[in-house]
Image (cartoon, coloured by chain):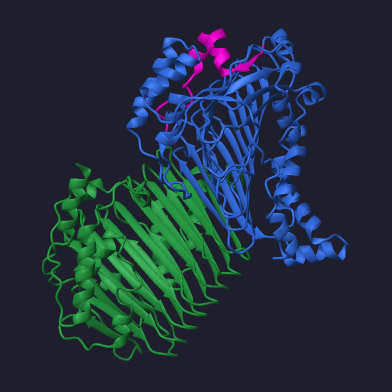
Chain colours: A blue, B green
């Protein structure tokens, strides 16, 4: 490996800084009292407290999953503070009232909130730790009937909607981390697009983990009614810490007849230093339900951060003719571990799904694709195409592919392909002969490798994601 | 409940497996295996390796050790090209039915009683098929009172195939046939591992075949599983291949109510070449499970694998193909394909091609497809005047026969083609 490649691999985390804002944190530990306290602090209705408590009771009976291809020291769930909110402030009327410290943080991240909102036409619902601080462009959305607010606000303003859909896609008993999230989630986003409405702008949320040792438990719920259409962006960066932080989010998407939801993520959480110390544990449950006929859910993700990623954005294709898509780029470096992929559960007739996954491993990292394509006995004419490519940079990293294909209907057609390769000497030589140095050549090859996925990203994200990959791999090939 | 059932099943499996034998190393090997077999629990669908293959009906069987087999007619199972034949009936070696060993160039040792010991036996037996984590291999190793070892001496090419016939003739019996094939450096041989059941009742065959391929040697292995229709067949074939060695395996599973084949190949030196072709041809309520594991532990290895399943009626095919490229196994070139044809709406396929790669300078690819016959292909044949059933049969036959014609033993090819035609109702072949 050349020096250039090495430097590229060794890029320090550019977003590592801690914002100093007083936070209101509950003592460490988890029991029913802590859950009651969270619920009380958030002034929640009884049904939600019940939801939390029953999830907690179920969680107590579950054990941590051991099947993922990741290794980490046991997590002490009693050593985590389950609630942390910036100190209560009065409601903010405009951007000017936002804490200047917070604004500076976003600027460092390259997210000039007001500018981005104004210039790009993006409404940003900023999640700072667990409580929503500011929501912009709300009015414009309200004009067309779109509800886009923090989860806690939705619980108070639209309890019927939340109650109707919460936990319908990812039930609290779904898995260990989903149960934990259901018990202790603090905030998140809620988005509702009513019948026939095409959301006039791309909705975007920046998540940011701030308080050291506060696990973050986000809950996102997006509902698109009949014929509605929405594109949702989620982007993440986190400050540099030495203590591993647990992040167990749950994202639920519901698409009714003819609805279309596009969910894009760029994840660049702190991955730990080159020795694997610190970094976020990202154990996320994301699932979309194509409930109605002709509905469509599309996941696009660019995963570059976290010490450990355990994430399978999935689609349950219940409605006839519904469509599920999954486009993913996962880059791991140093000692990062990623076990990510998707599940496409075909239930309805003529359902279609596409999976494009590109994994890049460098350093001593381990990158696994784990996917399930399941065709149920009633899924007449179902169709799936999967392609999972891996690229290895350096001889000490690993790339694994675990595709599960389960077919119970003979009219279905399922195709899976996977390849593993490296950046060839001959490719670099060709670039060199054209006067392009190794670093730029690698960047171009990588960009070509991930192009199928990046073209799925909304414009602003594609630019940011391209920059991120370049940053992560600066100096890593030769 | 399930654990209890499977626990008592293992003791059934081990009935009569008192480690004996005159040779101390063999006694010790069997004692170690017995200890492991007792420590392991029989697999259930909760084990990832057995997730799609439910052994509960096997655990419910009242099995016993087989009795004396008496006179058996093996003429019908003869393979014309074979130069020599080893016959096992219900797991026990039958010297009286075997033939052609003297003069074949092969050395055959029956590991029973005061056999003539040699270093190559203890160096390989029980060393290739690992029993530490596999209850069935452990049970076989503990129970092998009549294993047979075959040696191809250095530099010798055996022209005619060796036919290893494993017959099962007794219902409710559990057999543990065991075979070791050692191909010394520069040698070349072909053997046919042929499992046949002649009884309609249920029985359990738990077979283990170990293959050691020395430097620059070549072993071709044809594996036919034609067990009885109510049979349970658990088979493991494990090969270890030294530098520049070549191992090719053609495997056909068409019998048994439930069958499992663990095909493990390990690279023990650089520059080896593996080829694995597999076909499962299933109907009624059959289940066939193939788990292959190709371990590229050294550099410059190549492997090619193609596994096809034709699944009719309410049958169920399972394929799990694991390819591991270890750190340092640079310049590995490996491809794997899983092709599955579903012929009925009750048929089911679970396939998982699996790549685990820890070296960067490698080329690895795998693919999997599941589907039914292409409507366009059926249409084309119909436009040529074939009725729809014939068109479908012809295409199904072509899909399956494509694997069979690769087998390098013509009479086996013809016999299998005839069996496929029976199953598909396909065309007469000249």
**x, y (%) of residue B57?**
23, 46
x 12%, y 71%: residue: B70
- Depth order, front residue of A212/B417: A212
Report the label total: 0
Residue B3 drawn above or below residue A217: below
Residue A68 appears in the picture as rendered? yes
**x, y (%) of residue B425?**
42, 51
- Depth order, front residue of B220/B332: B332
Q: Which residues are magenta?
A: A146-175
x 46%, y 37%: residue: A409
**x, y (%) of residue B416?**
40, 63
Determine which quarter of the picture holds residue A377: top left
**x, y (%) of residue B201?**
19, 54
Q: Is residue B19 left or right of residue A448?
A: left
User: Quadrant location of the N terminus of chain B?
Assistant: top left
Residue B83 drawn above or below residue B327: below
Residue B426 appears in the picture as rendered? no
Determine which quarter of the picture holds residue A460: top right
- Queried whether the magenta region covers residue A173, the answer comes back as yes
Q: Is residue A473 left or right of residue A375?
A: right
């Amino acid at each position: 490996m050349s020096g250039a490649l090495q430097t590229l691999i060794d890029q320090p985390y550019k977003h590592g800084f801690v914002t100093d804002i007083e936070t209101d944190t509950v003592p460490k530990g988890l029991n029913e009292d802590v859950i009651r306290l969270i619920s009380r602090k958030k002034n929640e209705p009884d049904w939600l407290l019940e939801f939390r408590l029953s999830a907690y009771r179920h969680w107590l009976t579950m054990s941590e999953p051991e099947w993922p291809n990741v290794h980490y020291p046991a997590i002490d769930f009693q050593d985590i503070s389950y609630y942390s909110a910036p100190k209560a402030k009065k409601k903010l009327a405009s951007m000017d009232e936002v804490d200047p410290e917070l604004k500076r943080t976003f600027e460092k991240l390259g997210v000039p909130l007001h500018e981005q909102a104004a210039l790009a036409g993006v409404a940003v619902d900023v999640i700072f730790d667990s409580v929503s601080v500011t929501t912009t462009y709300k009015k414009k959305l309200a004009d067309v009937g779109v509800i886009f607010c923090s989860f806690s606000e939705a619980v108070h303003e639209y309890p019927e909607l939340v109650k109707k859909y919460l936990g319908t896609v990812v039930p609290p008993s779904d898995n260990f981390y989903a149960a934990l999230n259901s018990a202790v989630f603090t905030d998140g986003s809620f988005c509702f697009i009513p019948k026939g409405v095409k959301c006039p702008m791309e909705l975007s949320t920046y998540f940011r983990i701030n308080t050291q040792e506060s696990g973050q438990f986000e809950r996102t719920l997006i509902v698109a009614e009949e014929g509605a259409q929405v594109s949702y962006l989620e982007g993440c960066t986190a400050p540099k810490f030495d203590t591993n932080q647990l992040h167990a989010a749950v994202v639920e998407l519901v698409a009714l007849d003819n609805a279309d939801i596009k969910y894009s993520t760029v994840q660049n959480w702190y991955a730990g230093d080159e020795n694997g110390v610190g970094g976020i544990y990202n154990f996320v449950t994301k699932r979309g339900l194509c409930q109605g006929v002709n509905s469509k859910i599309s996941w696009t993700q660019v995963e570059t951060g976290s010490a450990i990623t355990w994430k399978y954005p999935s689609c349950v294709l219940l409605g006839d003719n519904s469509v599920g898509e999954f486009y993913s780029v996962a880059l791991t470096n140093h000692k990062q571990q990623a076990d990510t992929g998707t599940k496409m559960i075909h239930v309805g007739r003529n359902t279609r799904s596409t999976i494009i996954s590109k994994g890049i491993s460098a350093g001593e990292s381990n990158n696994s694709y784990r996917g399930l394509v399941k065709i149920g006995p009633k899924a007449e004419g179902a169709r799936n195409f999967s392609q999972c490519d891996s690229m290895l940079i350096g001889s000490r990293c690993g790339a694994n592919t675990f595709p599960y294909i389960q077919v119970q209907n003979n009219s279905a057609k399922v195709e899976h392909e996977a390849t593993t390769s490296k950046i060839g000497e001959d490719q670099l030589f060709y670039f060199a002969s054209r006067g392009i140095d190794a670093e730029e050549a690698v960047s171009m090859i990588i960009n070509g490798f991930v192009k199928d996925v990046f073209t799925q990203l909304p414009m602003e994200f594609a630019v940011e994601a391209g920059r991120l990959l370049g940053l992560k791999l600066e100096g890593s090939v030769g | 409940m399930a654990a209890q059932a499977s626990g008592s099943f293992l003791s059934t499996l081990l009935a009569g497996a008192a480690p004996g034998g005159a040779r101390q190393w063999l006694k010790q090997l069997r004692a170690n295996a017995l200890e492991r077999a007792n420590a392991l629990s029989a697999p259930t669908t909760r084990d990832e390796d057995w997730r799609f293959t439910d052994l509960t009906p096997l655990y419910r069987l009242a099995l016993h050790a087989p009795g004396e087999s008496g006179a058996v007619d093996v003429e019908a199972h003869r393979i014309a090209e074979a130069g020599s034949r080893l016959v096992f009936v219900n797991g026990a070696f039958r010297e009286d039915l075997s033939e052609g060993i003297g003069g074949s160039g092969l050395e055959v040792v029956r590991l029973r009683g005061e056999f003539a010991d040699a270093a190559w036996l203890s160096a390989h037996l029980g060393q290739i098929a690992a029993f530490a984590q596999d209850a069935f291999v452990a049970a076989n190793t503990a129970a092998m009172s009549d294993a047979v070892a075959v040696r191809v001496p250095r530099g010798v090419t055996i022209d005619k195939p060796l036919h290893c016939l494993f017959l099962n003739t007794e219902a409710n019996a559990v057999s543990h046939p065991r075979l070791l094939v050692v191909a010394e450096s520069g040698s070349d041989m072909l053997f046919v591992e042929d499992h046949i059941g002649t009884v309609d009742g249920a029985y359990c065959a738990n077979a283990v075949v170990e293959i050691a391929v020395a430097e620059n040697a070549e072993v071709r292995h044809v594996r036919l599983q034609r067990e009885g229709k109510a049979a349970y067949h658990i088979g493991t074939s494990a090969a270890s291949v030294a530098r520049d060695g070549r191992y090719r395996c053609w495997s056909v599973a068409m019998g048994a109510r439930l069958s499992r084949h663990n095909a493990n190949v390990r690279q023990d030196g650089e520059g080896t070449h593996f080829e694995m072709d597999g076909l499962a041809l299933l109907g009624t309520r059959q289940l066939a499970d193939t788990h292959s594991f190709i371990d590229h532990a050294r550099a410059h290895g190549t492997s090619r694998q193609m596994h096809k399943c034709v699944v009719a009626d309410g049958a169920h095919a399972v394929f799990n193909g694991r390819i591991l490229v270890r750190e340092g196994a640079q310049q590995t070139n490996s491809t794997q394909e899983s092709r599955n044809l579903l012929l009925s709406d009750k048929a089911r396929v679970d396939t998982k091609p699996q790549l685990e790669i820890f070296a960067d300078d490698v080329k690895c690819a795998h693919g999997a497809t599941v589907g039914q016959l292409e409507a366009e292909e059926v249409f084309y044949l119909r436009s040529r005047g074939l009725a729809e059933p014939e068109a479908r049969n012809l295409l199904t036959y072509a899909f399956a026969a494509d694997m069979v014609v690769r087998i390098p033993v013509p009479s086996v090819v013809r016999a299998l083609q005839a069996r496929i035609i029976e199953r598909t109702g396909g065309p007469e072949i000249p």
